[in-house]
Image (spheres, rainbow, N blue to C red):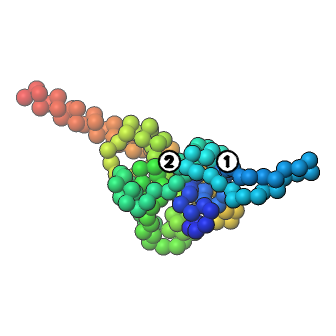
Amino acid sequence: MVNSNCLEGLRCPDCGNEHAFYIQSTAVMYVTDDGAECRSDIEWDDHSHTQCPQCERSGKLSDFKVKSPAAIADDKQYTVASSHGELTADAEGNVTDRRLDNQDPDGGGHLAQIIRFDLVEWQKHWGNPETRHIDILDLGYWYTDPETQEIVFASPDAKWRSEIAEILLERRLFLAKQARSGEAT
């Protein structure tokens, strides 16, 4: 959804929600014992406290502003590969581009619903890897459930991660053995 009014340029940096926010605002009110009536424009700025009603992330409104295309281009980007296409994510994990091979509900159609990847957890798990190409099985991500329209989190594939860790260990052991045999000659 692209907002073009009050929420233009706003998106939750954690879950990708763009639909609604709690924003601390100011207004001139006409107040009597019976209640209050707004008598001015309602105003907020980049420093206004903001909270996402979906994931409860809170902070300054400026924390919820979507980066411009130029700012995104300056950021580190990641290519997330799947057997149904590729997604591009910015440094915060927000999906910025999609190249889908199909629209199957469990394939490209599902990839189209992904809004953000959990790069922080991925970096902690692997110790800040240098790669910019990631298999989708290695990442947790948030997506919009097409039936309920709710934001849902999908965890990384633990079995896949275990298999990759085993392959990496075997490679390190092989290289260490090669290095030792080279020293012996």
The three-letter amino acid code for the residue at tag 1 is Gln
The residue closer to the viewer here, 75 or 153, is: 75
Residue under pointer 1: 24
Instruction: Find the residue positioned furthest to the right.
Output: 34
The residue closer to the viewer here, 104 or 141, is: 141
Q: Is residue 4 above or below residue 159?
A: below
Q: Which residue lies at the image location 60% right of the left edge and 61% below the top edge?
A: 7
- Image coords of residue 175 (percent x, y): 22, 36
**Label 1: element kind:** loop
The residue closer to the viewer here, 146 or 32, is: 32
The three-letter amino acid code for the residue at tag 2 is Asp
- Image coords of residue 4 (percent x, y): 58, 68
Q: Which mark is residue 118?
A: 2
Q: Quadrant of the C terminus?
A: top left
Residue 110 visible: no
Dot in front, 1 or 2: 1
Q: Residues within 10 Å of mark 1 (few under 14, many from 20)?
A: some
Q: Is residue 19 left or right of residue 2?
A: right
Instruction: Give the image quarter of residue 126.
Output: top left
